[in-house]
Amino acid sequence: MGKRTAIVTGSTSGIGKGVAEGLAAAGCNIVLNGFGDAKQIETQRAQLEKAHDVGVIYSGADLTDVAAIEGLFEETAKAFGGADIIVNNAGVQHVSPVEDFPVAKWDLIIALNLSAAFHTIRLAFPQMKKNGWGRVINIASAHALVASPFKSAYVAAKHGILGLTKTTALEGAQHGIRVNAICPGYVHTPLVDGQIDDTAKARGISREEVINNVLLAAQPTKEFVKVEDIAGLVTFLISDAANQVNGAALSIDGGWVAQ
Ligand code: NAD
Protein backbone atom coordinates (compact mmCIF):
# COMPACT_ATOMS: atom_id res chain seq x y z
CA MET A 1 0.00 0.00 0.00
CA GLY A 2 1.12 3.55 -0.71
CA LYS A 3 1.30 6.31 1.82
CA ARG A 4 -1.58 6.67 4.25
CA THR A 5 -3.29 10.04 4.42
CA ALA A 6 -4.16 11.64 7.75
CA ILE A 7 -6.47 14.57 8.42
CA VAL A 8 -5.47 16.23 11.68
CA THR A 9 -8.05 18.83 12.71
CA GLY A 10 -6.77 21.84 14.62
CA SER A 11 -3.17 21.17 13.61
CA THR A 12 -1.91 24.74 13.32
CA SER A 13 -1.20 24.84 17.07
CA GLY A 14 -0.48 22.80 20.19
CA ILE A 15 -1.28 19.08 20.27
CA GLY A 16 -2.55 18.87 16.68
CA LYS A 17 0.61 20.47 15.36
CA GLY A 18 2.73 17.91 17.21
CA VAL A 19 0.51 15.03 16.07
CA ALA A 20 0.77 16.18 12.42
CA GLU A 21 4.56 16.23 12.80
CA GLY A 22 4.56 12.71 14.30
CA LEU A 23 2.33 11.29 11.57
CA ALA A 24 4.40 12.93 8.82
CA ALA A 25 7.52 11.43 10.40
CA ALA A 26 5.71 8.06 10.29
CA GLY A 27 5.31 8.52 6.52
CA CYS A 28 1.73 9.78 6.23
CA ASN A 29 0.49 12.47 3.87
CA ILE A 30 -1.03 15.19 6.01
CA VAL A 31 -4.05 17.46 5.77
CA LEU A 32 -3.42 20.38 8.11
CA ASN A 33 -6.41 22.31 9.42
CA GLY A 34 -7.02 25.13 11.84
CA PHE A 35 -6.80 28.88 12.11
CA GLY A 36 -3.79 31.18 12.28
CA ASP A 37 -1.43 33.41 10.39
CA ALA A 38 -1.39 32.40 6.70
CA LYS A 39 2.38 32.87 6.34
CA GLN A 40 3.17 30.82 9.43
CA ILE A 41 0.86 28.03 8.30
CA GLU A 42 2.48 27.93 4.87
CA THR A 43 5.91 27.72 6.53
CA GLN A 44 4.67 24.84 8.71
CA ARG A 45 3.19 23.07 5.66
CA ALA A 46 6.31 23.45 3.50
CA GLN A 47 8.65 22.38 6.33
CA LEU A 48 6.62 19.27 7.05
CA GLU A 49 6.58 18.29 3.40
CA LYS A 50 10.32 18.84 2.98
CA ALA A 51 11.44 17.20 6.23
CA HIS A 52 9.45 14.00 5.80
CA ASP A 53 9.04 13.57 2.04
CA VAL A 54 5.24 13.38 2.26
CA GLY A 55 2.42 15.39 0.71
CA VAL A 56 0.99 18.11 2.95
CA ILE A 57 -1.99 20.33 2.19
CA TYR A 58 -3.74 22.90 4.35
CA SER A 59 -7.48 23.48 4.67
CA GLY A 60 -8.80 26.40 6.68
CA ALA A 61 -12.21 24.72 7.13
CA ASP A 62 -14.14 26.00 10.15
CA LEU A 63 -15.20 22.76 11.81
CA THR A 64 -18.28 24.30 13.36
CA ASP A 65 -19.65 24.53 9.81
CA VAL A 66 -20.93 21.23 8.38
CA ALA A 67 -20.55 22.36 4.76
CA ALA A 68 -16.94 23.35 5.47
CA ILE A 69 -16.23 19.88 6.90
CA GLU A 70 -17.65 18.36 3.73
CA GLY A 71 -15.37 20.72 1.79
CA LEU A 72 -12.38 19.49 3.82
CA PHE A 73 -13.11 15.94 2.68
CA GLU A 74 -13.47 17.07 -0.94
CA GLU A 75 -10.08 18.81 -0.76
CA THR A 76 -8.54 15.67 0.76
CA ALA A 77 -10.04 13.43 -1.93
CA LYS A 78 -8.75 15.74 -4.65
CA ALA A 79 -5.20 15.87 -3.25
CA PHE A 80 -4.72 12.31 -1.97
CA GLY A 81 -7.74 10.21 -2.99
CA GLY A 82 -9.26 10.27 0.53
CA ALA A 83 -8.38 9.92 4.21
CA ASP A 84 -7.18 6.74 5.96
CA ILE A 85 -6.60 8.33 9.35
CA ILE A 86 -8.65 11.00 11.10
CA VAL A 87 -7.40 12.72 14.21
CA ASN A 88 -10.25 14.74 15.71
CA ASN A 89 -8.29 17.26 17.71
CA ALA A 90 -9.68 20.77 17.11
CA GLY A 91 -11.18 22.05 20.32
CA VAL A 92 -11.80 25.12 22.41
CA GLN A 93 -12.45 25.72 26.09
CA HIS A 94 -14.46 28.21 28.09
CA VAL A 95 -14.35 28.49 31.87
CA SER A 96 -17.36 29.95 33.67
CA PRO A 97 -19.86 29.04 36.39
CA VAL A 98 -22.82 27.30 34.77
CA GLU A 99 -25.31 30.02 35.66
CA ASP A 100 -23.20 32.60 33.77
CA PHE A 101 -22.10 30.27 30.97
CA PRO A 102 -22.66 32.13 27.67
CA VAL A 103 -25.14 30.16 25.55
CA ALA A 104 -23.14 30.92 22.39
CA LYS A 105 -20.03 29.38 24.03
CA TRP A 106 -21.98 26.25 24.93
CA ASP A 107 -23.15 25.91 21.32
CA LEU A 108 -19.63 26.52 19.96
CA ILE A 109 -17.99 23.96 22.25
CA ILE A 110 -20.57 21.26 21.50
CA ALA A 111 -20.27 21.96 17.75
CA LEU A 112 -16.46 21.91 17.64
CA ASN A 113 -15.45 19.50 20.41
CA LEU A 114 -18.22 16.95 19.74
CA SER A 115 -20.35 17.37 16.59
CA ALA A 116 -17.35 17.97 14.29
CA ALA A 117 -16.05 14.48 15.16
CA PHE A 118 -19.43 12.97 14.28
CA HIS A 119 -19.22 14.66 10.88
CA THR A 120 -15.64 13.63 10.11
CA ILE A 121 -16.40 10.04 11.13
CA ARG A 122 -19.59 9.81 9.06
CA LEU A 123 -17.73 11.24 6.06
CA ALA A 124 -14.64 9.03 6.50
CA PHE A 125 -16.34 5.69 7.16
CA PRO A 126 -17.56 4.83 3.62
CA GLN A 127 -14.06 4.90 2.16
CA MET A 128 -12.47 3.27 5.21
CA LYS A 129 -14.98 0.42 4.91
CA LYS A 130 -14.26 0.11 1.20
CA ASN A 131 -10.51 -0.04 1.89
CA GLY A 132 -10.94 -2.41 4.83
CA TRP A 133 -8.65 -0.14 6.88
CA GLY A 134 -9.11 3.05 8.82
CA ARG A 135 -8.04 4.70 12.06
CA VAL A 136 -9.95 7.37 13.95
CA ILE A 137 -8.29 8.92 16.97
CA ASN A 138 -10.33 11.34 19.03
CA ILE A 139 -8.35 13.68 21.23
CA ALA A 140 -10.67 13.71 24.23
CA SER A 141 -9.35 14.69 27.68
CA ALA A 142 -9.08 13.56 31.29
CA HIS A 143 -12.27 15.63 31.36
CA ALA A 144 -13.89 12.86 29.30
CA LEU A 145 -13.64 10.70 32.44
CA VAL A 146 -13.89 13.13 35.36
CA ALA A 147 -15.18 16.67 35.80
CA SER A 148 -13.85 19.95 37.14
CA PRO A 149 -16.06 22.87 38.10
CA PHE A 150 -16.76 25.73 35.65
CA LYS A 151 -16.23 23.63 32.49
CA SER A 152 -19.75 22.37 31.87
CA ALA A 153 -19.70 22.51 28.06
CA TYR A 154 -16.18 21.11 27.71
CA VAL A 155 -16.77 18.24 30.13
CA ALA A 156 -20.12 17.42 28.49
CA ALA A 157 -18.59 17.43 24.99
CA LYS A 158 -15.59 15.34 26.07
CA HIS A 159 -17.78 12.78 27.87
CA GLY A 160 -19.90 12.71 24.71
CA ILE A 161 -16.96 11.98 22.47
CA LEU A 162 -16.21 8.82 24.45
CA GLY A 163 -19.73 7.59 23.65
CA LEU A 164 -19.17 8.39 19.99
CA THR A 165 -15.80 6.61 20.13
CA LYS A 166 -17.31 3.42 21.60
CA THR A 167 -20.29 3.35 19.24
CA THR A 168 -18.29 3.88 16.06
CA ALA A 169 -15.59 1.44 17.27
CA LEU A 170 -18.29 -1.25 17.31
CA GLU A 171 -19.61 -0.23 13.90
CA GLY A 172 -16.15 -0.31 12.30
CA ALA A 173 -14.79 -3.36 14.12
CA GLN A 174 -15.33 -5.90 11.35
CA HIS A 175 -14.28 -3.51 8.59
CA GLY A 176 -10.66 -3.01 9.66
CA ILE A 177 -11.54 0.31 11.29
CA ARG A 178 -10.35 1.18 14.79
CA VAL A 179 -11.72 4.12 16.75
CA ASN A 180 -10.04 5.18 19.97
CA ALA A 181 -9.88 8.18 22.27
CA ILE A 182 -6.83 9.68 23.91
CA CYS A 183 -7.47 11.36 27.25
CA PRO A 184 -4.63 13.76 28.04
CA GLY A 185 -4.11 15.56 31.30
CA TYR A 186 -2.77 19.10 31.12
CA VAL A 187 -0.49 19.88 28.19
CA HIS A 188 0.98 23.40 28.22
CA THR A 189 -0.41 24.63 24.89
CA PRO A 190 -1.98 28.00 23.95
CA LEU A 191 -5.39 26.53 24.94
CA VAL A 192 -4.22 25.86 28.50
CA ASP A 193 -2.40 29.17 28.73
CA GLY A 194 -5.66 31.01 28.03
CA GLN A 195 -7.40 28.88 30.62
CA ILE A 196 -4.92 29.84 33.31
CA ASP A 197 -6.08 33.47 33.09
CA ASP A 198 -9.77 32.51 32.95
CA THR A 199 -9.48 30.16 35.93
CA ALA A 200 -7.57 32.80 37.90
CA LYS A 201 -10.43 35.20 37.30
CA ALA A 202 -13.17 32.63 38.07
CA ARG A 203 -11.50 31.59 41.34
CA GLY A 204 -9.98 34.95 42.29
CA ILE A 205 -6.39 33.58 42.55
CA SER A 206 -3.05 34.22 40.78
CA ARG A 207 -1.73 32.47 37.63
CA GLU A 208 0.95 30.71 39.69
CA GLU A 209 -1.66 29.41 42.11
CA VAL A 210 -3.75 28.14 39.18
CA ILE A 211 -0.75 26.21 37.75
CA ASN A 212 0.33 24.67 41.05
CA ASN A 213 -2.91 24.34 43.01
CA VAL A 214 -5.50 23.79 40.26
CA LEU A 215 -3.94 22.35 37.09
CA LEU A 216 -1.04 20.29 38.40
CA ALA A 217 -2.82 19.59 41.68
CA ALA A 218 -4.74 16.90 39.81
CA GLN A 219 -1.66 15.52 38.09
CA PRO A 220 0.32 13.23 40.46
CA THR A 221 3.57 13.52 38.44
CA LYS A 222 3.36 17.32 38.91
CA GLU A 223 4.48 17.67 35.30
CA PHE A 224 2.64 18.80 32.20
CA VAL A 225 2.11 16.16 29.49
CA LYS A 226 4.23 16.94 26.41
CA VAL A 227 2.81 17.37 22.91
CA GLU A 228 5.40 14.76 21.78
CA ASP A 229 3.95 12.24 24.27
CA ILE A 230 0.53 12.55 22.61
CA ALA A 231 2.10 12.28 19.14
CA GLY A 232 3.84 9.07 20.26
CA LEU A 233 0.56 7.53 21.38
CA VAL A 234 -1.13 8.48 18.10
CA THR A 235 1.73 6.89 16.15
CA PHE A 236 1.30 3.71 18.22
CA LEU A 237 -2.44 3.67 17.50
CA ILE A 238 -1.90 3.65 13.73
CA SER A 239 0.66 0.82 14.00
CA ASP A 240 -0.11 -2.89 13.54
CA ALA A 241 0.68 -3.48 17.23
CA ALA A 242 -2.52 -1.58 18.06
CA ASN A 243 -4.76 -3.75 15.86
CA GLN A 244 -6.81 -4.97 18.81
CA VAL A 245 -7.04 -1.62 20.56
CA ASN A 246 -10.58 -0.47 19.74
CA GLY A 247 -13.15 1.68 21.52
CA ALA A 248 -10.61 2.49 24.22
CA ALA A 249 -10.16 5.64 26.28
CA LEU A 250 -6.39 5.84 26.72
CA SER A 251 -5.31 8.06 29.60
CA ILE A 252 -2.07 10.00 29.31
CA ASP A 253 -2.34 12.21 32.38
CA GLY A 254 0.43 11.39 34.85
CA GLY A 255 -2.05 9.39 36.95
CA TRP A 256 -4.80 12.03 37.31
CA VAL A 257 -7.82 9.75 36.83
CA ALA A 258 -6.25 6.92 38.86
CA GLN A 259 -7.11 8.90 42.01
P1 NAD B 1 -4.75 24.86 20.84
O1 NAD B 1 -5.60 26.03 21.19
O2 NAD B 1 -3.28 24.98 20.95
O3 NAD B 1 -5.11 24.35 19.37
C1 NAD B 1 -6.43 24.24 18.93
C2 NAD B 1 -6.46 24.08 17.44
O4 NAD B 1 -7.83 24.03 17.00
C3 NAD B 1 -5.81 25.25 16.68
O5 NAD B 1 -5.13 24.76 15.54
C4 NAD B 1 -7.02 26.09 16.26
O6 NAD B 1 -6.79 26.91 15.12
C5 NAD B 1 -8.02 24.99 15.95
N1 NAD B 1 -9.40 25.45 15.91
C6 NAD B 1 -10.05 26.23 16.81
N2 NAD B 1 -11.31 26.45 16.39
C7 NAD B 1 -11.46 25.81 15.20
C8 NAD B 1 -12.52 25.67 14.28
N3 NAD B 1 -13.71 26.25 14.49
N4 NAD B 1 -12.30 24.94 13.17
C9 NAD B 1 -11.11 24.36 12.92
N5 NAD B 1 -10.06 24.44 13.78
C10 NAD B 1 -10.24 25.17 14.90
O7 NAD B 1 -5.31 23.65 21.75
P2 NAD B 1 -4.64 22.29 22.28
O8 NAD B 1 -4.34 22.48 23.71
O9 NAD B 1 -3.58 21.82 21.37
O10 NAD B 1 -5.90 21.32 22.23
C11 NAD B 1 -6.14 20.41 21.20
C12 NAD B 1 -7.16 19.37 21.66
O11 NAD B 1 -6.64 18.67 22.79
C13 NAD B 1 -8.50 19.96 22.08
O12 NAD B 1 -9.55 19.13 21.64
C14 NAD B 1 -8.40 19.95 23.59
O13 NAD B 1 -9.67 19.87 24.19
C15 NAD B 1 -7.60 18.68 23.81
N6 NAD B 1 -6.92 18.64 25.11
C16 NAD B 1 -6.01 19.58 25.44
C17 NAD B 1 -5.40 19.50 26.69
C18 NAD B 1 -4.37 20.50 27.12
O14 NAD B 1 -4.01 20.47 28.29
N7 NAD B 1 -3.87 21.35 26.25
C19 NAD B 1 -5.72 18.47 27.57
C20 NAD B 1 -6.67 17.53 27.20
C21 NAD B 1 -7.26 17.63 25.96
Image (cartoon, rainbow, N blue to C red):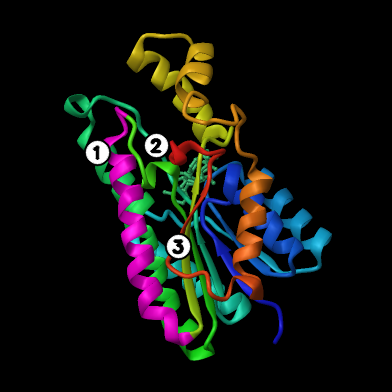
Q: From where the camera sits, is residue 65 visible?
A: no
Neighbourhood count class around disc 3 (C-alpha, 10 Å): few under 14, some 14–19, many 20 upward: some
What numbered label is drawn on residue 248? 3
Residue 64 visible in the displayed image: yes
Q: Nearer the viewer, mark 2 or mark 1?
A: 2
Q: Residues within 10 Å of mark 1 (few under 14, many from 20)?
A: few
Q: Amino acid at mark 1?
A: Ala
Per the rendering, the mark at residue 104 is 1
Of helix, strand and loop, which one carries label 2? loop
Element marked by disc 3:
loop
- Magenta residues, start to end: 149-175
The CA distance from mark 2 to mark 3 is 23 Å
Which residue is at a point 57% across and 38% down the rendered structure image?
254
Q: Earlier in the sequence, mark 2 or mark 1?
A: 2
The residue depicted at 36 percent of the width and 48 percent of the height is: 158
Cα gap from disc 1 to disc 3, whole angstroms:
31 Å
Q: Which structural element holds mark 1?
A: helix
Percent from the top left, x then y, of residue 236?
Answer: 65, 63
Expressed as whole percent of the image width and height from the top left, the position of residue 223 reads: 62, 30
**Three-letter amino acid code at disc 3?**
Ala
